[in-house]
Image: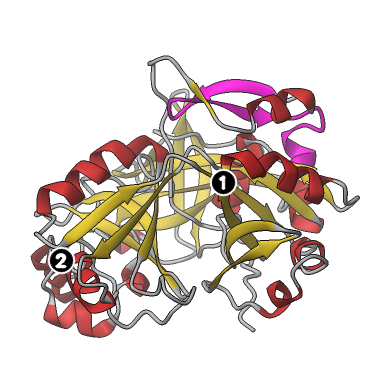
């Protein structure tokens, strides 16, 4: 998932004053003023999330609902399957999946979360969470293909927060005991301490935790509830980026984009077997071609062997000086106390442990390809 900077006047989330009151450094991001860090600092925020629980504002993301006039789930699920490669029809109430919008050429237009609501009377509705920098084009893409009898409702009254880390479950379950046993990629529509929420066991840090959709008018109260716990700290975008990089998770516009197919990005796991075989979605031809013939490049982890981080755009060369790829995300990994990166290389160099060199300021620096993630994922499977 991802967000891109814009040069237009920034909007503010419902938590803007909350961030300022905590001493956040605010920056323009994806069209919003967002907290990049708090007084704790990016390094300590990152490590706190890995050790305890971090609270993130992700309200700049797009939230929307799809539903059919006839009140059936089947009709809207079949429609969405024409736009995404994942299996939507088999979603159980309260289940969600990660997937992508693909163009006709199989390039990734955006990545997103797709959920079937579990609340009685609402199980025919599909809930979408899309990236902030792509949401306008995503909604236009859906509208372009929307058949008669199916509706898209974009929600402008909802905030979205994430509570991530090994202590997240113990914090939330004090107010919602059911949260402790909620499995990864499952959701509930239920009050938390009297505040109505859509809560899913998911997130983008590689840690256990939750993403919680709540009305703007209630989001400050919910955040204050969580922040009252000693285990919880507010976390900014700086640590969010280093956490997801260590976890090997793609950032849209960087590690995946319209030139990238899900197969070369290593996202084949998100396309269920029968959908790979049957197709029926935009871009299916390229997906099947990449699966059959294997793409010419693959996304890999890159471990610089020195202390200097390899930033996005850094050229990757073979040991004999051939250009073989480029870094798409890179920085310092606080959890491993070393630089970490990911990028694309020509397939024959993708095997874990392959020695490569990175061209930094005109000088070759030693590195090697490694298996992602850099830090094991700690999702709660139940």
Horizontal side of 178 relative to 124 (left or right) equals right
Q: What secondary structure is marked by label 2?
A: loop
What residue is drawn where x is 75% and y is 30%? 38
Crowd class of label 1 (few under 14; some 14 to 19; many from 20; radius 10 Å): some
Q: Dividing the picture into quarters, in which one does residue 171 lie? A: bottom right
64, above or below 82, in the image: above
Q: Nearer the viewer, mark 1 or mark 2?
A: 1
Residue segment shown in magenta:
25-45
Horizontal side of 330 relative to 275 (left or right) equals right
43, above or below 74, in the image: above
Magenta stretch encompasses residue 32: yes
Horizontal side of 11 relative to 135 (left or right) equals right
Q: Could you give the CA–CA distance between mark 1 and mark 2, rounded to whole angstroms?
A: 31 Å
59, above or below 30, in the image: below
Mark 1 touching mark 2, by CB under 8 A?
no
Q: Quadrant of the C terminus?
A: bottom right
Q: Nearer the viewer, residue 194 or 185?
A: 194
What residue is drawn where x is 79% and y is 43%? 224
Crowd class of label 2 (few under 14; some 14 to 19; many from 20; radius 10 Å): some
Task: Give the labeled residue for mark 1.
Answer: 215
Q: Dividing the picture into quarters, in which one does residue 258 lie? A: top left
In percent of width and height, residue 196 lies at: 62, 58
Q: Which mark is residue 165?
A: none
Horizontal side of 289 relative to 186 (left or right) equals left
In percent of width and height, residue 297 lies at: 26, 56
What residue is drawn where x is 14% and y is 72%? 288
- Any part of residue 75 in sight: yes
Ranked by sequence position, the earlier of labels 1 and 2 is 2
Task: Give the labeled residue for mark 2.
Answer: 82
């Amino acid at each position: 998932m991802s967000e891109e900077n814009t040069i237009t006047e920034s909007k503010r989330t419902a938590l803007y004053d909350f961030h300022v009151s905590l001493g956040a450094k605010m920056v323009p991001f994806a069209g919003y003023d967002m907290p990049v860090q708090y007084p704790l600092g990016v390094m300590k925020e990152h490590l706190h999330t890995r050790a305890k629980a971090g609270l993130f504002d992700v309200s700049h993301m797009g939230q929307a609902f799809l539903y059919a006039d006839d009140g059936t789930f089947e009709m809207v699920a079949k429609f969405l399957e024409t736009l995404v490669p994942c299996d939507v029809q088999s979603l159980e109430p309260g289940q969600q999946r990660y997937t992508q919008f693909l163009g006709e050429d199989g390039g990734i237009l955006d990545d997103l979360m797709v959920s079937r609501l579990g609340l009685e009377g609402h199980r025919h509705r599909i809930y979408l969470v899309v990236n902030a920098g792509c949401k306008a084009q995503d909604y236009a893409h859906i509208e372009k293909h929307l058949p008669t009898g199916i509706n898209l409702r974009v929600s402008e009254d909802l905030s979205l927060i994430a509570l991530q880390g090994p202590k997240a479950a113990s914090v939330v379950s004090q107010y919602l005991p059911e949260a402790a046993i909620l499995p990864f990629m499952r959701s509930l529509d239920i009050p938390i301490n009297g505040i109505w929420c859509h809560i899913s066991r998911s997130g983008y840090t590689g840690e256990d935790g939750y993403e919680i959709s709540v009305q703007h008018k209630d989001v400050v109260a919910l955040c204050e509830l969580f922040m009252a716990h000693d285990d919880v700290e507010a976390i900014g975008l700086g640590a969010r980026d280093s956490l997801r990089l260590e976890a090997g998770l793609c950032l849209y516009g960087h590690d995946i984009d319209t030139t990238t197919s899900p197969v070369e990005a290593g996202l084949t796991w998100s396309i269920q077997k029968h959908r790979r075989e049957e197709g029926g979605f935009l871009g299916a031809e390229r997906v099947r071609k990449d699966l059959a013939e294997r793409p010419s490049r693959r996304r890999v982890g890159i471990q610089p062997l020195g202390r200097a981080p390899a930033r996005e755009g850094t050229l990757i060369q073979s040991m004999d000086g051939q250009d073989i790829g480029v870094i798409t995300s890179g920085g310092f990994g606080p959890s491993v106390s070393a630089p970490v990166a990911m990028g694309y290389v020509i397939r024959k160099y993708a095997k874990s442990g392959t020695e490569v060199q990175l061209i930094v300021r005109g000088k070759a620096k030693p590195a090697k390809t490694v298996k992602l993630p850099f830090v094991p994922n700690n999702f709660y499977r139940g």
